[in-house]
Amino acid sequence: MGLLDPAEWKAKWIAGNYVPKKDRYPSDYFRKTFTLNEQVKKARLYITACGLYEASINGHRVGTQCFTPGSTEYNKRLQYQTYDVAELLRDGMNAMAVVLGDGWFRGQVGPFGSRRVFGAETKLLAQLEITTLSGEQITVVTDDSFMWSNVGAIRENDLQVGEVYDAAMALTGYDTPEFEDCSKFGPVKLTEYHTRLVCSNNVPVMEREHFKPKLIKTPSGETVLDFGQNMAGYPAFSVSGPKGHAIILQMAEVLDEDGNFTVRNLVGNKLDFQRIRYICSGNGKEYYKPKFAIQGFRYVLVKNWPGELNPDDFEAIAVYSAMEKTGDFTCSHPLVNRLVENARWSMKSNFLEVPTDCPTRERAGWTGDAQLFFETGSYFMDVAPLYRKYLMDIADCQGKDGKVPCIVPDVGSKVVSMLDGAVGWADAIILIPYRYWKIYGDKDIIKVNYPAMKKYAGFIIDRATKNRLFSRFKKNPYRQYTYEVGFHWGEWLEPMENLSLKLLMKPKREEATAYFSYTMSCLAEIADEIGETADAKQYRTCAEGAKKAYNYLYVKDNDIVADRPAKYVRPLAFGLLPEEARKNVAASLLADTKARNYTIGTGFLSTPFILPVLTEFGYIDDAYQMLEQEEIPGWLYQVKTGATTIWEKWDAIDKNGKVKFASHNHYSYGAVCNWLFRDVCGIRLSDGDEYNYVIVPHPGGDLTYANASFRSIWGEVRSNWEIREDKVHYTIQIPANTTAKLVLPVSADKGFQIIQGKDGFDDGQWTLGSGTYEFVTEK
């Protein structure tokens, strides 16, 4: 537990005894010794830092978490962790030690490499509360009794840039009572930091999978290690070298078109990026792994290795928030299976305290990416704790006028902040709680976040009314619901789109008005659920008004004429069209899809919806063709090209093998996996009270079988199908104490029939209780 009353904090903030004037400094090392005269019954360490910390007691590391205290909007809210440390203490002399890193607090963050976003001085706050066997209460707190040094082994550290580590300068044993060389330690500096301290309420960031490499020599003659999987984490190694011998490691996601090491897809071959400089001590075999740096990589360039390099001396360690696995999908198509794993790995790589866009050049919490991937992420892993915490971050960053930033927490970019409030991104403040509520059945999430949602609603309602003086459509009778002002990212990264400042500055009326209607309709439903009926009425009026505005501006003769598929997908997915227009627009989407030869024409905002929309209108074979086509732009093109994670851009490696400027570890387009669970195997959570699940599988394409499982809040549900001898064999498993509606693609009036299955068939629908069921239908 955390401390229940802020007044219980007796510790003082301490810092290194220097005045920070430059960008990078050695790590701060703190220590204190104290004596216990009897054995310990209970002990709790409460600790946090401005920066990152790693604590130890009597030579033993405290906990196994990484990158604590985590990423927040530090000037609003700072997390601390609580550890049970009773087993680390002993009768007699004890030592507590802490080393600090720059982390998100003062290190390089975001797309433009901002530094010192929250401050220039790393600081420590710690409180150790001990109860002895006799009941005596002893408290050890950070104050001026601590000692400080900055002449330890970590000479520089940065989450993005990397570490410089001089093993000869290691303060060996400084965290033990036996340490005697205190000549390198001096007094600390008492300091202050005013923020709200909160106990960490997220899953911990942990070391997870470990990988061994293959050694390759590139055409240019460089020594590179290939770990076979793109990931976020760090390399670890053992080495023996003479004192002062410097080894350089640099991490990258891909090799270039010639098979050589490159980071130009991220930073244009910038040397000071994702690098480790390790300086040997000369004391025999040494082991190293970073403390305060994390990289996105599959390949490691090794320079100046002493002697012959043995790949067995290396491993790569994946590091991410330790979310529990909730779902699996496998099918007969090996490339689709790899696509699923790629999406899961991009999720692992980017779900570190907050959902980020890439683990390399940015590591920024883009709100649009986070809201679009929420449902897919919930199929893969239990994302509830991480998103609950992230919603607090969003509320912390929200402006007084209700505007929501594009990136949360802040990364200090004035360029990005010009687009704060952008639709699809800022709407995360409503759409994430809405989906969270639907998937996890958690009504508290919408209650707690309702004030922030309401503030944002006021912001966009105000924006919609302000556009009237500048509207190009002055005869528009729904001008007050037509969202025309502000800068927006729009569809973002449509295939082969040429990014430019002009493109960003261009009005995004269609996208904005569509999101205005959709987001307000979700908020109206939320307001009704928590009893805010007056608000619900206002939001529903806005939703309907924006829907009418959308139809007035974009629908002609019950159809839409568009040059981009997103303009068909969005109104269909958001329910913006009257019934008579829906089929026509769906048919237009189908025609566009075929004209593109089933390649993908959508960007970030619409790609998650295109296959579900095609499926909804009965174009299941066409949805499968889009999934399975292997040309660029397409999901399986990436897999065929050797991707082990999802790319930021469809052409991150073009058809000639050229590596483009783009991240190769970006989960957004992996949202297609939602369709695999929801439509291919048909596992859906019910939106009503009658059933817990609605199971609607859709066999098709070149797949001969598909299996999916999902552990929801009610238990694990499974939906499998297999085609054998022109028959479809279904196996459905419903968990205890739940019910499901099963809908199979069979109908008597279409000549299909059930060959084997449960009684109670009603035009392809059954009500199932808990248990395992088998059905056989004609193909």
Image: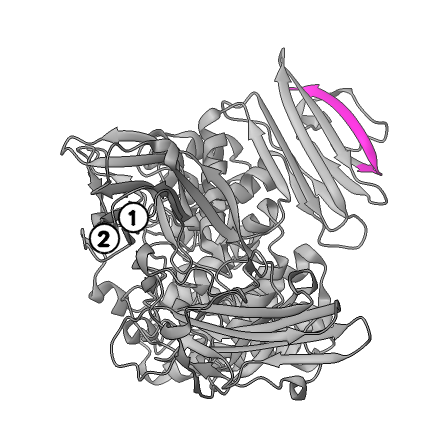
Quadrant of the image for the C terminus? top right
Residue 267 covered by magenta stretch: no
Magenta-tinted stretch? 767-779
Instruction: Report the amino acid beneath label 1.
Output: Gly
Which sits in the foreground, 346 or 700?
346
Query: Does residue 422 appear anywhere in the picture?
Result: no
Colour mapping = one colour
> Residue placed farthest to the top in the image?
725
Quadrant of the image for the N terminus? bottom right
Determine whether the residue tagged by mark 1 lies in a helix, strand or loop. loop
Which sits in the foreground, 353 or 754?
353
Residue 772 covered by magenta stretch: yes
Determine whether the residue tagged by mark 2 lies in a helix, strand or loop. loop
- Residue that carries the numbered disc 1 in the rendered image: 282
The image shows residue 4 at horizontal and vertical percentages of: 71, 80
476 to 672, vertically: above or below: below
Which sits in the foreground, 108 or 354?
108
Q: Are marks 2 and 1 in contact (CB under 8 Å)?
A: yes
Query: Does residue 482 appear anywhere in the picture?
Result: yes
- Residue that carries the numbered disc 2 in the rendered image: 244
